Image: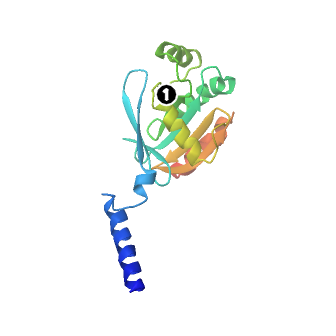
Amino acid sequence: MFQKSLLATLVSLSILFQACSDSEDPNELLTTHQYTLSDLSSTQHVVTKGLEGFSLQGAEEKVVIFDIFATWCPPCQNGATHLTSLQEKYKDNLIVMGITIEDTITNEKLTEFQEQFNARYTLTNSKENRRLVDAIASHLDLGERFPIPLLAMYKNGKLINYYLGAVQEEFIESDIKQALGK
């Protein structure tokens, strides 16, 4: 009798937990999130966190670099020119997206940064920035406090490499070439 009661309880619990989700993949609810970011021209960019990393909608087969930065950060300022150089060199195969960690920065200040430091790639100033930055840092096991700039490079939602702090353009370019099979 005890075995039948235990079996019935286990079957009931199993059905209950399976019925709580419409998803075929039980891990999907824990791993898939979307972040909608606005750039300086108010264009919307959708970033999706999947099982293996992050992808940018419309950037399939392209390398995407998420540049997590602050306008007041000297290594971030110096890196902007190098990221612009790479964006121009690999314009058909690379998207650089600058994501500021400054919660209250205005678009005017971000535009000043763009002009002063030749940051000729997408810069976002969105309320979703902080959530995305936290998700990327968590995915990379960096904890809540990490040095900036943080460059996280993905292709088709899979992590290629990431860099903390200042990094030479040649190292980034080497990873871009490898990801593109060049």
Name above or below for residue 36 compared with residue 115. Answer: below
SS of the residue under disc 1: loop
Q: Is residue 14 left or right of residue 114?
A: left
Name above or below for residue 106 compared with residue 22. Answer: above
* Residue shown at 53% from the left, 39% from the top: 65
Name above or below for residue 40 compared with residue 153. Answer: above
* Residue shown at 59% from the left, 38% from the top: 151
In the rendered image, residue 50, in percent from the top left (x then y), is placed at: 44, 51
Residue at label 1?
A: 121
Image label count: 1
- Residue furthest bottom as drawn: 1
Q: Please say which color scheme the image uses.
A: rainbow
Q: Quick check: can you spot residue 43? A: yes
In the rendered image, residue 22, in percent from the top left (x then y), is placed at: 30, 57
35 vs 181, nearest the viewer: 35
73 vs 178, nearest the viewer: 73
Residue 17 location, quadrant: bottom left
- Residue furthest front as drawn: 1
73 vs 22, nearest the viewer: 22
Q: Quick check: can you spot residue 90? A: no
Residue type of the residue flagged with mark 1: Tyr
In the rendered image, residue 67, in percent from the top left (x then y), is placed at: 56, 34
Say which quadrant the N terminus sits in: bottom left
In the rendered image, residue 83, in percent from the top left (x then y), is placed at: 57, 31
Residue 24 location, quadrant: bottom left
* Residue shown at 63% from the left, 28% from the top: 79
For label 1, count other residues whose C-alpha is less than 10 Å away and answer few (under 14), some (14-19) or many (20+): many
* Residue shown at 60% from the left, 41% from the top: 173
